[in-house]
Image (spheres, rainbow, N blue to C red):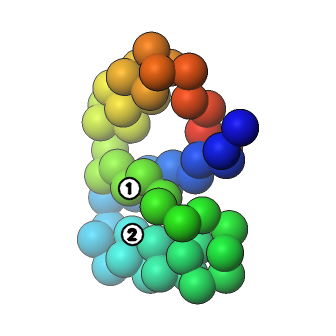
Amino acid sequence: MELRVMVVDDDKMFNLIAKVLLRDTGIACNPTICTNGEEALETIGQEIALDKFFL
């Protein structure tokens, strides 16, 4: 099972820094970035249908 990481924050600069750090440290190759809770819940709903899980 592939580990998926989701970052949820409305600050675009924080999201960029988090994405780079997650990639550079090898924690997540392709982290999912959402800018609000509603977007995150929609994304999780779509991914659950595909049997993917987030950390």
Q: Earlier in the sequence, mark 2 or mark 1?
A: 2
Quadrant of the snapshot with the N terminus? top right
Q: Is residue 21 visible?
A: yes
Label 2 close to label 1 by CB (< 8 Å): yes
Q: CA distance from mark 2 to mark 1?
A: 7 Å
Question: What residue type is disc 2 on?
Answer: Asn
Instruction: State left or right for residue 39 relative to residue 33.
Output: left
How crowded is the residue under tag 1: few (<14 C-alpha within 10 Å), some, or many (20+)? many
Q: Position of residue 44 (x, y in %)?
A: 45, 28
Q: Residue at x 56, y 29 (%)?
A: 52
Q: Is residue 46 above or below residue 4?
A: above
Give coordinates of residue 11: x percent, y percent.
32, 68
Dividing the picture into quadrants, the one containing residue 14 is bottom left
Element type at mark 2:
helix
Residue 30 % position (x, y)? 47, 61
> Which residue is disc 2 drawn over?
15
Residue beneath disc 1: 33
Whether residue 15 sits left or right of residue 28 in the image: it is: left
Image point (67%, 81%), residue name: 25
Quarter that holds the C terminus: top right
Q: Amino acid at mark 1?
A: Ile
Q: For the image shown, how many numbered marks are present on the structure?
A: 2
User: Which residue is painted at 39% across and 69% down in the image?
Assistant: 15
Q: Nearer the viewer, residue 48 or 33?
A: 48
Name, please, the residue furthest toward the top. 49
Answer yes or no: is residue 18 visible.
Answer: no
Q: Secondary structure at mark 1?
A: strand
